[in-house]
Image: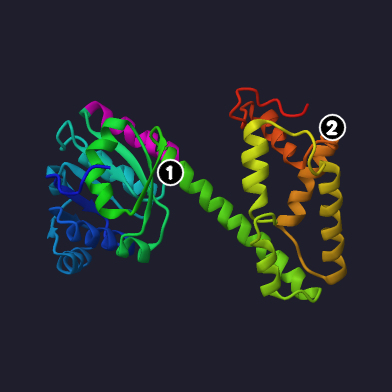
Amino acid sequence: MTSCGESVQVALCGLGNMGSAIAGRLTDAGLPALVFDLDAERTRRAAEASGAAAAASVAELATADVVLLSLPTPKASLEVVAELAPLMRADGVIAETSTVNPPDMAAAGEVCAPHGVGIIDAAILSGVSQMRCGAAALLVGGEDRHVRKAEPVLDAISGSIRRFGPLGSGMSAKVLNNAVAHAVMVVLSEAGALAAATGVSGTALAELLGGADAGLTRPLTHRFVERILRAEYEGGMPTEAARKDSALVLDLAQQTNVPLFALQSTHTVYELGLAQGLGRYDYSAIATLWEQWTGRPMSETGDGSGGE
């Protein structure tokens, strides 16, 4: 990444908790920053705390080389982009740090393109405290030339920048990461309830699941990376055995009066896998169901046909 010492003017629109933390990172890095929020008092406080200059309107931000957005909704972001793009220099770049979906980034890109303004997604994976201390991770998507233009700014606010691909890919990565985390939280809550009902301590369960070959890590490191991405489903633990184990936990939940939501719904997939002839293949072969349903392979071998 490019050094933060390069001369670049940066502006920031949106001064909530995350936006205020970003403002502090910018001024700590010595970048001349101009900040704005619809709430004038919030703008004043953030400018005072960070040492940035306060803008009186969105239009004033258009003088910057790079404009960062930290806004509450996709609609708000698109409205700001629509106001900024016609006013910015043709080589200016808008960097979206708010959490939006890839189609939102595509819509913003369409607004920017006629004016020669670039736009990238710089999704923030970390929380406010990590941003404040410089440990936040950014998931970046967009054209290389636009990312390069914004590099001094990205370097200033992030201790870890991960490049994913075209516009929208960084946002997609964040949404997917969060979806997995939120789904896992439900599964862990169900597992914890079952553990409490059957005399297994939560500490012991956490130690078990955290192991390299256990239920949290093994599906990712072995089954997703080594099997699904390579379309290698021969051998391993058969889908029919996974279905049997899934049925056992449903029985256990009934016996202990523990309500299930995530584990109940995942069992359906294994039933579908057996119906599709995947019984003797490794249970990661359930991924091929989604390949059939979407018509898009997950494997990176160019095959994606799996074990069928």
Q: State which tag comes first along the sequence, 2 or 1.
A: 1
Q: Residues within 10 Å of mark 2 (few under 14, many from 20)?
A: few
Q: Is residue 38 visible?
A: no
Describe residue 71's horizontal placement relative to residue 289 as left or right.
left
| 265 over 163 or under it: above or below | below
| Amino acid type, mark 1 | Met
- The residue under the point 12% across, 53% down is 32
Q: Main secondary structure of the magenta part?
A: helix
Q: Which mark is residue 277?
A: 2
Q: State the CA–CA distance, disc 2 to disc 1.
A: 36 Å
Q: Secondary structure at mark 2?
A: loop
Q: Where is residue 204 shown, x and y percent of the image?
A: 70, 72
Residue found farthest to the top: 302
The answer to the question of whether label 2 and label 1 lie on touching residues, with beta carbons closer than 8 A, is no
Residue identifier under label 1? 171
Q: On the rendered image, what quadrant is the C terminus found in? A: top right
